Image: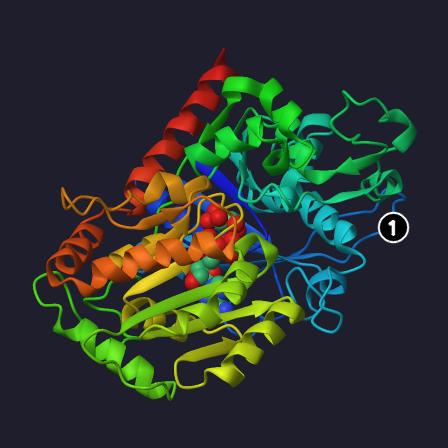
């Protein structure tokens, strides 16, 4: 199949969170299964100059009023991290006015979304058809991801570009909370007359405005989210459905769950070049080295017999339950724990964590910023990993943790339910520790249970073993996407 995967991020070119990891890995997994999978993302300024680029020249992309949007089509190839000689073609839509600036979603100066974000995503989506035409390549499937590319499916449904007319459409929801909800007038930018689209049944109308996520949901042949549990939650729980639960329920069995995979080549403790020592189930001694070095590197008090090291790598947002951690840390510091948090986000959370560090500098470190290599060192050096998310469509870090023999402590929500089997000390089964109550006490309870288990040599060994034998590789998830694509094409044939 020829599959065009469109989205706002793809690692290693552009990454803010898990969407980048997913779009960076899925095309490789599809290519390994013999498909012609091509990625299309914006050519952010941060990408240009970092990779070798081929130019296909200017594309004709115009605003509704006819005014041209300067657009070039660039191409690069991403080699497979498996080193199997395969590479994925990446199309980069260069629209300097919209994407050469710093920042992917948020303006680094204000910390808020860009004021013209609707124009940025519309302009990008409007370039997808012309990009395919320029290549002389028509996809069988257009696989759009999250609200940023919802308009691509609306354009395909309402005003299809010839290069996309025959393509089936899959829409993947990675985070329903970020919907792209704007005033109706933004439709004019893409040449739609708001007065023609003012009925709530119209894909372009939403509560008197317009909503890019709704466009994707209504116009896709099939929709998936990134775990079964989240697929259920967003149809049944108004808080998690974020206003779209009715629409999602209406699409019924067209809404599926496919749990993300992880790139087991990039995240492999036996070979990871970012770690100070390597380890595997057969020889775990390197994990201890990673732990000692992490504490030393961060100037934390060295670990003793009973010490348990907790890690967290996260966007510092309400979604991730950072407030629960802040409320629990003083209490945790009474025990023989070390806690390391890497993240960036809301200034209030950053300040809250720094204030705790000022009180407990020997046992707690917060690193504000984005660091791929530190993320790997925390995954390897920690004994347990905190993910107290309010909601979590899938979550990748719990899977990275398990692969690194690091026990996940997770809230019972979304993909965390689907991927973390609770530890049963009597049977010696399971991998992690859940809590349901959305409070610091709930988190503390789960941390307490994890710490007891990790201090006991037998259950510790069991836990590490159970974590490390899990298979979260993309092969399974890519197979599920393949089935969705086949189903869509079969519908089209009918
Ligand atoms: P989300 O996409 O909601 O942020 P995920 O768990 O799916 O959550 O994915 C987060 C990804 O982003 C992981 O690869 C994680 O390691 C990475 N990440 C988040 N914050 C940072 C950071 N400050 N530094 C390095 N990596 C980070
Ligand atoms: C979103 C979700 C996260 C998911 C990621 C990749 O950012 O918050 O749970 O793992 O997308 O699908």
Horizontal arrangement in the rendering, residue 476 relative to residue 492 (left or right): left
Horizontal arrangement in the rendering, residue 136 relative to residue 148 (left or right): left
Residue at the spot x=71%, y=59% of the render?
95
The residue most toward the top is: 494
Residue 299 in the image: state x and y as whole percent: 37, 89
- Tell me the quarter of the picture where residue 181 sits: top right
Residue 150 in the image: state x and y as whole percent: 65, 38
Residue 246 in the image: state x and y as whole percent: 65, 23
Q: Is residue 29 above or below residue 489?
A: below
Q: Is residue 85 visible?
A: no
Q: Nearer the viewer, residue 225 or 64?
A: 225
Count neighbours of disc 1 (C-alpha within 10 A) and say few if under 14, some if 14 to 19, many if 20 or more: few
Q: Is residue 215 above or below residue 285?
A: above
Residue 375 in the image: state x and y as whole percent: 40, 70
- Tell me the quarter of the picture where residue 445 sits: bottom left
Q: Is residue 353 visible?
A: yes
Colour mode of the rendering: rainbow
Residue at the spot x=34%, y=43% of the render?
419
The residue most toward the left is: 282
Q: On the image, numbered disc 1 is attached to which residue?
A: 67
């Amino acid at each position: 199949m020829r599959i065009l995967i469109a989205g706002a991020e793809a690692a290693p070119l552009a990454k803010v969170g898990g969407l980048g990891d997913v779009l960076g890995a899925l095309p490789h997994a599809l290519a390994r299964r013999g498909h012609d999978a091509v990625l299309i993302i914006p050519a952010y300024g941060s990408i240009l100059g970092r990779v070798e680029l081929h130019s296909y020249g200017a594309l004709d992309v115009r605003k509704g009023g006819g005014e041209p949007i300067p657009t070039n089509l660039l191409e690069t190839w991403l080699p497979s991290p498996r080193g199997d000689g395969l590479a994925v073609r990446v199309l980069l839509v260069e629209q300097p006015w919209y994407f050469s600036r710093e920042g992917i979603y948020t303006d680094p100066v204000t910390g808020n979304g860009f004021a013209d974000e609707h124009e940025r995503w519309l302009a990008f989506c409007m370039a997808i058809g012309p990009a395919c035409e320029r290549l002389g390549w028509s996809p069988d499937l257009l696989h759009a991801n999250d609200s940023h590319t919802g308009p691509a499916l609306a354009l395909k449904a309402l005003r299809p570009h010839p290069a996309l007319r025959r393509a089936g459409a899959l829409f993947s929801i990675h985070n329903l909370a970020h919907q792209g909800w704007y005033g109706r007038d933004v439709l004019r930018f893409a040449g739609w007359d708001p007065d023609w689209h003012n009925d709530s049944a119209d894909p372009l109308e939403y509560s008197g405005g317009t909503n890019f996520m709704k466009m994707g949901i209504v116009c896709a042949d099939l929709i998936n989210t990134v775990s079964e549990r989240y697929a259920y939650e967003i149809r049944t729980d108004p808080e998690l459905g974020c206003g779209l639960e009715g629409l999602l329920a209406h699409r019924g069995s067209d809404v599926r769950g496919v749990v993300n995979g992880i790139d087991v080549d990039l995240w492999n403790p036996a070979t990871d070049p970012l770690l100070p020592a390597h380890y595997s189930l057969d020889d775990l001694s390197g994990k201890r080295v990673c732990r000692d070095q992490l504490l030393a590197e961060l100037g934390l008090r060295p670990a003793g017999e009973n010490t348990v090291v907790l890690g967290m790598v996260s966007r510092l947002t309400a979604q991730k339950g950072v407030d629960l951690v802040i409320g629990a840390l003083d209490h945790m510091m009474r025990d023989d724990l070390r806690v390391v948090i890497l993240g960036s986000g809301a200034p209030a959370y950053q300040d809250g964590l720094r204030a705790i560090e000022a009180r407990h500098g020997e046992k707690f470190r917060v690193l504000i910023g984005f660091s791929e290599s530190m993320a790997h060192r925390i995954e390897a050096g920690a004994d347990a990993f905190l993910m107290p998310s309010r909601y979590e469509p899938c979550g990748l870090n719990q899977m990275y943790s398990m692969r690194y023999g690091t026990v996940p402590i997770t809230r019972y929500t979304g993909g965390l339910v689907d991927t973390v089997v609770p530890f049963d000390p009597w049977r010696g089964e399971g991998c992690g520790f859940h809590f349901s109550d959305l409070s610091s006490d709930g988190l503390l309870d789960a941390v307490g249970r994890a710490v007891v288990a990790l201090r006991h040599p037998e259950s510790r060994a069991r836990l590490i073993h159970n974590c490390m034998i899990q298979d979260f590789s993309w092969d399974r998830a890519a197979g599920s996407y393949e089935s969705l694509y086949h189903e869509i094409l079969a519908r089209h044939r009918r």
